[in-house]
Amino acid sequence: MLYPYAEFPGELSITYSQIMVDDNVKGGKKLLVHFEQPTDYGFKEARYELPDYKEIYNYDFTPSETRNNLDILKRNESLIWKCAEEEEIMID
């Protein structure tokens, strides 16, 4: 399940997943962050994995938009983690 994080100018929506246990990443926990933006023909979509900023997929974001998405992700990482942790508490 994805939870809403923010909507930025240009209708760029960012959502995040629940925290997942993964021994292959730093700290043993990861979460997915999804970027989505409507277009005339559907949606641009990209998904990244935190904490390592690994790009899982990127459909139709330009290189410049991708750099912007990564910049947003890096500047908001700590708050996204806090939101995911709060969501985890609410689920328990």
Image (cartoon, grey):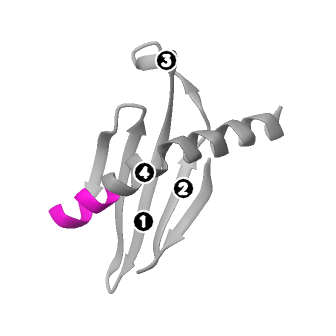
CA–CA distance between discs 2 and 3? Answer: 21 Å
Count up the numbered dots: 4
Q: Which mark is residue 15?
A: 2
Q: Are the residues flagged by discs 2 and 3 in contact, CB closer than 8 Å?
A: no
Judge the density around disc 1: few (<14), some (14-19), many (≥20) Cα neighbours within 10 Å: some
Q: Are the residues flagged by discs 1 and 2 in contact, CB closer than 8 Å?
A: yes
CA–CA distance between discs 4 and 2? Answer: 15 Å
Residue 54: % across, % down = 31, 37
Q: Quadrant of residue 38?
A: bottom left
Q: Upstream in the sequence, badge 3 or badge 4?
A: 3
Judge the density around disc 2: few (<14), some (14-19), many (≥20) Cα neighbours within 10 Å: some
Span highlighted in magenta in the image: 60-69
Q: Is residue 30 left or right of residue 44?
A: right
Q: Upstream in the sequence, badge 1 or badge 2?
A: 2
CA–CA distance between discs 1 and 2? Answer: 8 Å
21 inside magenta stretch: no
Secondary structure at numbered mark 2: strand
What amino acid type is highlighted by mark number 1? Glu
What amino acid type is highlighted by mark number 2? Thr
> Nearest the camera: 43 or 5?
5
Identity of the residue drawn at 18% across and 65% down: 64
Q: Is residue 62 visible?
A: no
Judge the density around disc 3: few (<14), some (14-19), many (≥20) Cα neighbours within 10 Å: few
CA–CA distance between discs 1 and 4? Answer: 18 Å
Residue 59: % across, % down = 27, 60
Residue 6: % across, % down = 56, 64
What amino acid type is highlighted by mark number 3? Gly
